[in-house]
Image (cartoon, coloured by chain):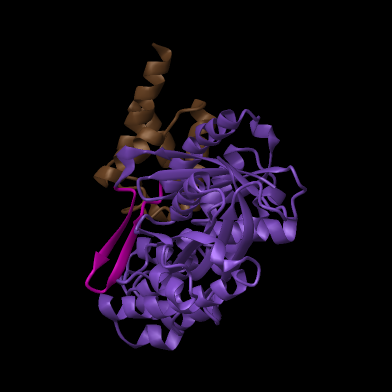
Amino acid sequence: MPARILAIETTTPPVAYSQRELFDQVFSKWYADIPDAEKLFMNTTVQQRFTSWTPEQLATRVLTTAERVELWAESTMDMGRRLMARLFEQVDKSRIGSFVMATCTGYVGPSPELQLAGEFGLPASLRRTFIGHMGCYAAFNVMKTALDAVDARPGELVLANATEVCTVHLRPEATREQVVTHALFGDASASMILGSVDEPGGGPVILRTRTETVYETTEMMTWTITDTGFRMTLSPYVPFILGEKIGPLIEGLCADEGIALSDLKWWGIHPGGPKIVDFIGKEMGLSDAQLRASRHVLANYGNCSSATILLVLEEIMKTDRPAPGDYGVLTGFGPGLTMESTLIRF
Amino acid sequence: MNAHTIEALLAEEILAACPELGTVPSDASLTGDLGLDSLTLTSLFASVKAEFGHVSLAPWFIAASNSGTDTVGSLAAFIADRLAARAA
């Protein structure tokens, strides 16, 4: 059963740093032995990122994982509080029946959605789900869980959130692969309120989702926990794989709904890196206008892991302003390789 | 077209983009030893498509990533196999 997005809000840590500031103050020192580090770093098209650290803090010393997760918890709660305050100005919080939250950048127990629910006085009977460590596509699992909740209890509302504090895991490991991953990631949090399509007030409707896992590619993207932070690996061939696999995924999503690929007017592509957006745009024959929102988010926020696709959705809604009835698709990727997609009718 | 000929074509493409390499050994890793960036890789795979028609390289991407052996020789051998299968 579809679900309607009744509200969407996003936020970041308070301060953004330009890619130039970050490179000059921190990364140029970490990558002093890599001749083309600056070129690799700047080629990502990221212009600025919001970080939960200052460049001065980053350059001081290598923190332990415990210290990093403590910073993650502070930033997660700060962003979560700001989002919930905004959302509860728009909906009656006593109607929230479920709260689902995803992150892959830190863990604490009791988990953040429990702490936030308590602070904001949500019902003790609230159904909570915490989705951990799935990576950049986890917002899709948040949406799928929310759809199931709306389907089961259409009279209730669902609070859905994806929060990532990626920058607490920046580490001075000097390899070309790490230069690229460290040039991409930023911090953000995004929340939605979902309800049944019968809820008054309009808003985009999530019609359905479709998943594709390429099981033989488990080594191509990894996210592991070390003693000095979480460590990502990313094969340079990931964009090429996604470029070849995206067509069948989206064609299947459309076929499930009985619409044509050409009916999709709006595209939100998880901008894991610039090549992913370029390759998918080329493979699917998309215009620059259809790639605008994804590129805008990459340039102005970086890759904020699971929160990113909701930043893109918000950007489409607020800037492109799709007409009621327009179809759009959101698609995201992560370890697996896993490819996720969501069909939306605005 | 055999793997040796394909390998020579690939080496020519790579040297056109990165003349500073001087030589492209068969066992050189594209991303490791040769240090090709995403733009050069994109150009290389586009030239493969232009030269040989559509060849799905996904199986090679997967095998090369998993084994850490994304060598020029392995790419040439893969393309030669695909062309042979297409001709059969």
Q: Which chain is purple?
A: A
Tell me: residue A5, above or below residue A190. above
- The hue used for chain B is brown
Q: Position of residue B18 (x, y in %)?
A: 46, 52
Residue drawn at point x = 63 percent, y = 65 percent? A91
Q: Position of residue A176 (x, y in %)?
A: 37, 63
Q: Position of residue A267 (x, y in %)?
A: 63, 47
Q: Is residue A100 left or right of residue A202?
A: left
Residue drawn at point x = 23 percent, y = 68 percent? A226
- Of the pair A73 and A25, the residue shown nearer to us: A73
What range of the chain is rendered magenta? A219-237
On the question of residue B49 being in view, the answer is: yes
Q: Main secondary structure of the magenta part?
A: strand
User: Which quadrant would residue A45 be assigned to in this image?
Assistant: bottom right
Q: Position of residue B52 (x, y in %)?
A: 49, 27
Q: Is residue A318 left or right of residue A86?
A: right
Q: Is residue A312 left or right of residue A173?
A: right
On the question of residue A46 being in view, the answer is: no
- Of the pair A286 and A25, the residue shown nearer to us: A286
Tell me: residue A318, above or below residue A86. above
Tell me: residue B12, above or below residue B56. below
Q: Quadrant of the N terminus of chain A?
A: top right
